[in-house]
């Protein structure tokens, strides 16, 4: 079946602009996660959705970052007034979160964001 | 505060030999540990996992060992193949009921020489 998809694969923007990054999770997966990966580092957690609601947004670095998942499937990560330090690969993952509790997260290919 | 650490940024192994990748963690509340493999320009691919109540899990050429008292886990790949060359990330999960976010190490780049 289809995996997690993310669009665009690359986004170049100028400092101060607004960007939206999209994630299509695996069909039927109720949980969706956003991570950010900077060069030479492992992915860092940003936000987790269970269904339509943000169950944990403790990783969002500041109020310029916001994410939605209005119908419990596709999610959009929104960044306002982008800064050069926001440049990174933004990864999306989804999981089934079934009763067994194994909850393996499957990742998309990521969106590489470059802020000039 | 780095809760999950992979202290070796790189590892080089000869084809056919064993690769051992190590990972240390500090938080005893982690309930699941996972290894992901990442090729350039791709997202991390799930490899193998282990519950905190077990000490070993095996899947084909891949075995993960967990030593809870030392807060240490390792991934063994045997025999290593050139296609295994990638960056390997260790990740730890906060409890299932805490949302399941993953904390990743910095990664170890494995190079398997033919």
Image (cartoon, coloured by chain):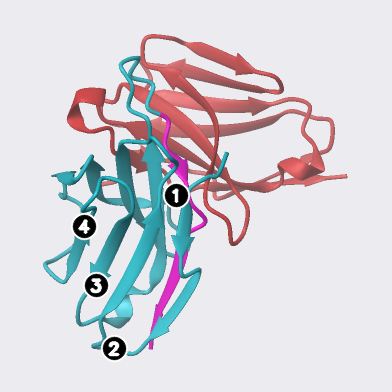
Chain colours: A cyan, B red
For disc 3, the marked residue is A79
Asked if residue A32 is positioned above or below residue B95 in the image, the reply reads below
At 46% from the left and 19% from the top, the residue drawn is B50
The chain letter for the residue carrying disc 2 is A
Residue A115 placement (x, y as % from top left): 36, 83
Q: Which SS class for mark 1? A: loop
The chain letter for the residue carrying disc 4 is A
Number of labelled discs?
Answer: 4
For disc 1, the marked residue is B106
At 36% from the left and 16% from the top, the residue drawn is B52
The chain letter for the residue carrying disc 1 is B
- Same subunit: marks 4 and 1: no
> Toward the viewer: B82 or A16?
A16
Mark 4–mark 3 CB contact (< 8 Å): no
Query: Which residue occupies the extreme right position in the image?
Result: B114
Mark 1 and mark 2: Cα distance apart in space = 28 Å
Mark 4 and mark 3: Cα distance apart in space = 12 Å
User: What is the span of residues highlighted in magenta in the rendered image?
Assistant: A104-116
> Toward the viewer: A2 or A59?
A2
For disc 4, the marked residue is A68
Q: Is residue B29 visible?
A: no
């Amino acid at each position: 079946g289809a995996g997690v998809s993310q669009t665009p694969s690359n986004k170049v923007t100028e400092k101060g602009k607004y960007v939206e990054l999209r994630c299509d999770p695996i069909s039927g997966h109720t949980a969706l996660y956003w991570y950010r990966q900077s060069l030479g580092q492992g992915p860092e957690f940003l936000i987790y959705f269970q269904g339509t609601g943000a169950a944990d947004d403790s990783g969002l670095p500041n109020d310029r970052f916001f994410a939605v998942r209005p119908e419990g499937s596709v999610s959009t990560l929104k960044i306002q007034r982008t800064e050069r330090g926001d440049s990174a690969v933004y990864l999306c993952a989804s999981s089934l979160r079934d009763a067994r509790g194994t909850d393996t997260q499957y990742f998309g290919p990521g969106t590489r964001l470059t802020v000039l | 505060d780095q809760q999950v650490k992979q202290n070796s940024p790189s590892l080089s192994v000869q084809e056919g030999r064993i690769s051992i990748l190590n990972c240390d963690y500090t938080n005893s509340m982690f309930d699941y540990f996972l290894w992901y493999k990442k090729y350039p320009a791709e997202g991390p691919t799930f490899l193998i996992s282990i519950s905190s109540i077990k000490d070993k899990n095996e899947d084909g050429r891949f075995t993960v060992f967990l030593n809870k008292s030392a807060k240490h886990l390792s991934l063994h790949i045997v025999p290593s193949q050139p296609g295994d060359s990638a960056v390997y990330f260790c990740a730890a999960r906060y409890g299932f009921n805490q949302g399941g976010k993953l904390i990743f190490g910095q990664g170890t780049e494995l190079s398997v020489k033919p």
